[in-house]
């Protein structure tokens, strides 16, 4: 389920990129050529094209898949860390080797 949702998320991201790049900017409409505002040619709201509707739908799906993947990821992480609460058995320490004599001291323990 997580993998399928991730694949859908990536595909929707590429769809959004393509649809947004296909749209023309605000200044590229015919109303801007005659000195008027580009939004006044088609009324106060402007033209609602197939590309703008597709962008809105893709953005909605993208946000929903983002939220769902975040929730699923948090649940998977908390489920995988449940075993960390158990204490780890202590390992036995290796036998300590005798300390090397200090070369600055002579055999009686005094300094030269």
Image (cartoon, grey):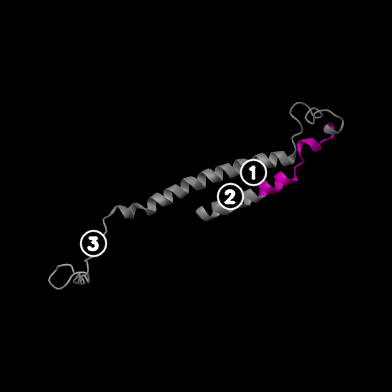
For residue 61, side relative to residue 89 (left or right): right
> Residue 32: which disc?
none
Label 1's element?
A: helix
Q: How many residues crowd mark 1 within 10 Å: few (<14), some (14–19), many (20+)?
A: many
Q: CA distance from mark 1 to mark 3?
A: 54 Å
Q: Residue at x 59, y 44 (%)?
A: 62
Q: Earlier in the sequence, mark 2 or mark 1?
A: 2
Image: 7 above or below 32: below
Q: Which residue is mark 3?
A: 90
Which residue lies under the disc numbered 2? 9
The residue indicated by pointer 1 is 58
Q: Which residues are magenta?
A: 15-31
Task: Using the image as rendered, state which of residue 93 and residue 54 is in the foreground.
Answer: 93
Label 1 or label 3, whichever comes before in sequence order: 1
* Direction from residue 17 to residue 93 in the image, left or right: left
Q: Is residue 70 above or below residue 104?
A: above
How far is mark 2 from mark 1, CA to CA? Answer: 10 Å
Marks 2 & 1, CB-CB < 8 Å contact? no
Query: In the depicted view, which residue is nearer to us: 87 or 107?
Result: 107
Q: Are marks 1 and 3 in contact (CB under 8 Å)?
A: no
Find residue 85 and report its horizontal and vertical position in percent: 30, 52
Circle 2 or circle 3, nearest the eye:
3
Residue at position x 58%, y 50% in the image: 9
Task: Write down the quadrant of residue 32 in the picture.
Answer: top right
């Amino acid at each position: 389920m997580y993998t399928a949702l991730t694949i859908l998320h990536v595909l929707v991201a590429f769809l959004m990129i393509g649809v947004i790049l296909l749209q023309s900017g605000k200044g590229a409409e015919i109303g801007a050529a005659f000195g008027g505002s580009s939004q006044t040619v088609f009324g106060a709201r402007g033209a609602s094209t197939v590309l703008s509707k597709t962008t809105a739908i893709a953005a909605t799906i993208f946000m929903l898949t983002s939220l769902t993947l975040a929730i699923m990821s948090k649940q998977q992480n908390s489920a995988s860390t449940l075993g960390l609460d158990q204490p780890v058995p202590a390992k036995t320490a290796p036998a300590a080797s005798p300390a090397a004599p200090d070369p600055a001291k002579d055999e009686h323990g005094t300094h030269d």
